[in-house]
Image (cartoon, rainbow, N blue to C red):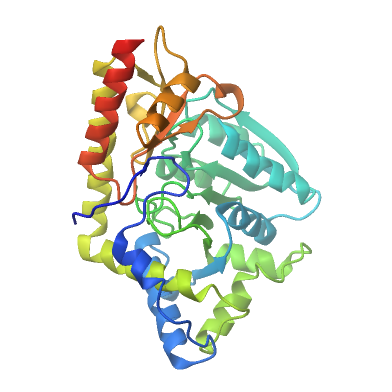
């Protein structure tokens, strides 16, 4: 796919560039969400997400698409798993891991944090050791920590966690990884996957995605934590009755339908490989400029990179200089605030976009 966008070049790891055909889909007239055309589109979107997430209906998984941000889906995952007094182990290494932990605390959980330094990821054996004492209702994992660009090996951590504590629910934040890196709910025995539209799927912001296992749904049915809008079981019942449980964001769903069709046509493996190639292109380019990524190669995310600009450069100055050249990137968050700039190389980003960014960075570095 080759597409052309007007300036500026949006490489912020938040809302990413959206292909023209996806934007065009949103311009269609709204359809009634109680009719067959909407039901067919909703079923088609959920079926495609099931394949992407490895969340098959025959295995008892439920998948819902909500008018929501990614944070809403983190809350939804917690609302299905946690009630006051539950012990929760949260792996934190950045702003979004901390956000997941804070949400669980709002639900009255006793949250223990397993903290790693920015750019690092949790070790499976350490997670298993912490869980082996028993009593943990849920484990919270951030697949891609968007604030640092570190990608957790969820498959390995989930396997170790399941062996150490079989009944602990495993909840995964996949907001900035879904579509750009493999995340297989059933194969990896994950209980909840929370994601959103505006990252690697290259859809405008406003749609949240939640997948839940039979184990999660069983826990939710017995939980005292309230759920109305976020209730995944209610979403599934309504969808099977060919209706939505509430007024949906119809035009955003048009965009999601087109984006998922494009992703399936490309092939999931090909899409993951494309994101890895973009990551490698960017990391090689900044290495030549003497700039350093926060995350090591072994845990580098294929969708986002946080960069220390190197001697003689300040992150804020680099961000401003790029903006003057029509290239928008993001600043650091939390402990990395003012120290890094962050680049999203996901969704509809192409190698030529990174070539332009790297050329601009070379010019900025040369001027000091």
Q: Residue furthest front?
A: 324
Within the image, what quadrant is residue 101 found in?
top right
How many numbered marks appear?
0
Q: Is residue 353 left or right of residue 179?
A: left
Q: Residue furthest bottom?
A: 36
Front residue (pair 141, 216): 141
Residue 177: image location, x then y, percent: 41, 47
Instruction: Quadrant for the N terminus, please.
Output: bottom left
Q: Residue at x 29, y 66 (%)?
A: 21
Residue 346 in the image: above or below residue 341? below
Q: Residue at x 61, y 50 (%)?
A: 168
Within the image, what quadrant is residue 260 found in?
bottom left
Q: Is residue 107 left or right of residue 151?
A: right
Residue 171 in the image: above or below residue 319? below
Residue 345: image location, x then y, percent: 33, 40
Residue 261: image location, x then y, percent: 29, 69
Residue 287: image location, x then y, percent: 27, 18
Front residue (pair 19, 264): 19
Residue 106 visible, this angle: yes
Within the image, what quadrant is residue 13 found in?
top left
Front residue (pair 215, 68): 68
Q: Residue furthest top?
A: 312
Instruction: Quadrant for the C terminus, please.
Output: top left
Q: Residue at x 25, y 38 (%)?
A: 278
Q: Is residue 285 left or right of residue 239?
A: left
Residue 294 visible, this angle: no
Residue 296 in the image: above or below residue 248? above
């Amino acid at each position: 796919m080759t597409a052309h966008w007007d300036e500026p070049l949006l490489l912020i790891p938040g809302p990413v560039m959206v292909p023209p055909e996806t934007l065009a889909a949103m311009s269609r007239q709204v359809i009634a969400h109680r009719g067959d055309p909407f039901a067919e589109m909703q079923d088609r979107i959920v079926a495609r997400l099931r394949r992407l997430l490895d969340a098959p209906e025959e295995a008892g998984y439920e998948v819902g698409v909500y008018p929501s941000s990614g944070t809403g889906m983190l809350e939804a995952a917690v609302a299905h798993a946690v009630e006051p007094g539950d012990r929760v182990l949260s792996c934190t290494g950045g702003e979004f891991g901390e956000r997941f932990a804070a949400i669980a605390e709002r639900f009255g959980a006793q949250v223990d944090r397993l903290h790693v330094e920015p750019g690092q990821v949790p070790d499976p054996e350490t997670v298993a050791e912490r869980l082996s004492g028993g009593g943990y209702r849920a484990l919270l994992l951030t697949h891609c920590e968007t604030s640092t660009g570190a990608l957790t090996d969820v498959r390995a951590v989930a396997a170790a966690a399941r062996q150490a504590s079989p009944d602990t629910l495993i909840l995964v934040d996949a907001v900035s990884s879904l579509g750009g890196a493999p995340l297989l709910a059933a194969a990896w025995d994950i209980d909840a996957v929370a994601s959103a539209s505006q990252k690697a799927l290259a859809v405008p912001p406003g749609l949240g995605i939640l997948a839940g296992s039979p184990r999660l749904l069983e826990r939710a049915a017995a939980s005292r934590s309230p759920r109305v809008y976020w209730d995944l079981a209610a979403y599934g019942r309504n969808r099977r009755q060919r209706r939505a449980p509430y007024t949906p964001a119809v035009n955003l769903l048009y965009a999601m339908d087109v984006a998922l069709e494009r992703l399936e046509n490309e092939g999931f493996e090909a899409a993951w490989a494309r994101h890895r190639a973009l990551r490698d292109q960017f990391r090689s380019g900044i290495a030549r400029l003497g700039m350093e990524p926060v995350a090591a190669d072994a845990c580098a995310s294929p969708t986002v990179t946080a960069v220390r600009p190197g001697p003689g450069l300040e992150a804020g100055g680099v961000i401003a200089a790029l903006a003057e050249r029509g290239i928008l990137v993001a600043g650091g968050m939390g402990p990395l605030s003012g120290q890094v700039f962050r680049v999203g190389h996901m969704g509809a980003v192409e190698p030529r976009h990174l070539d332009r960014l790297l050329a601009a960075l070379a010019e900025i570095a040369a001027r000091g």
